[in-house]
């Protein structure tokens, strides 16, 4: 499984949405992505990629796309 697939799976499993749906998601677009859902998402991503995000990155993590940008800083590779 690629890092992109792993990343997308965290979103799809947590928010019960399709891969196409999660790729367009932004924080608070759906009821499930509230403040509690956000921290659950961060925790799940940290566990999946064995990383610890800095507070500023957790705050800046406001969309599926922005998350890819942030996780690249932690050595997660989204290249094909």
Image (cartoon, rainbow, N blue to C red):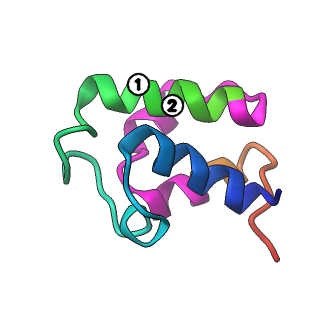
Residue 77 percent coordinates (x, y): 80, 59
Residue 35 percent coordinates (x, y): 26, 27
The alpha-carbon separation of the residues under discs 2 and 1 comes to: 5 Å
Image quadrant containing the N terminus: bottom right
Q: Which mark is residue 42?
A: 2
Counting other residues with Cα less than 10 Å from the Cα at mark 1, is it few (<14), some (14-19), or many (20 or more)? some
What residue is drawn where x is 51% and y is 31%?
42
Image quadrant containing the C terminus: bottom right
- Which residue is situated farthest in the bottom direction here? 80
Reply yes or no: does residue 57 show up in magenta: yes
Foreground pick, 59 / 5: 5
Q: How many marks?
A: 2
Residue 51 percent coordinates (x, y): 74, 29
What residue is drawn where x is 78% and y is 28%?
50
Residue 54 percent coordinates (x, y): 58, 27
Asked if the residues shown at circle 2 and circle 1 are in contact, with their CB atoms under 8 angstroms apart, the answer is: yes
Q: Judge left or right: residue 76 versus residue 11.
A: right
Counting other residues with Cα less than 10 Å from the Cα at mark 2, is it few (<14), some (14-19), or many (20 or more)? some
Q: Main secondary structure of the magenta part?
A: helix
Reply yes or no: does residue 33 show up in magenta: no
The magenta-colored residue range is: 48-69
The residue carrying mark 1 is 39
Q: Secondary structure at mark 2?
A: helix
Q: Secondary structure at mark 1?
A: helix
């Amino acid at each position: 499984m690629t890092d992109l697939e792993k990343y997308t799976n965290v979103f799809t499993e947590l928010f019960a949405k399709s891969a196409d749906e999660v790729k367009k998601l932004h924080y608070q677009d759906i009821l499930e992505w509230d403040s509690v859902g956000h921290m659950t998402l961060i925790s799940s991503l940290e566990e999946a990629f064995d990383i610890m995000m800095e507070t500023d990155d957790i705050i800046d993590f406001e969309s599926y796309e922005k998350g890819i940008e942030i996780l690249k800083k932690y050595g997660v590779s989204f290249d094909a």
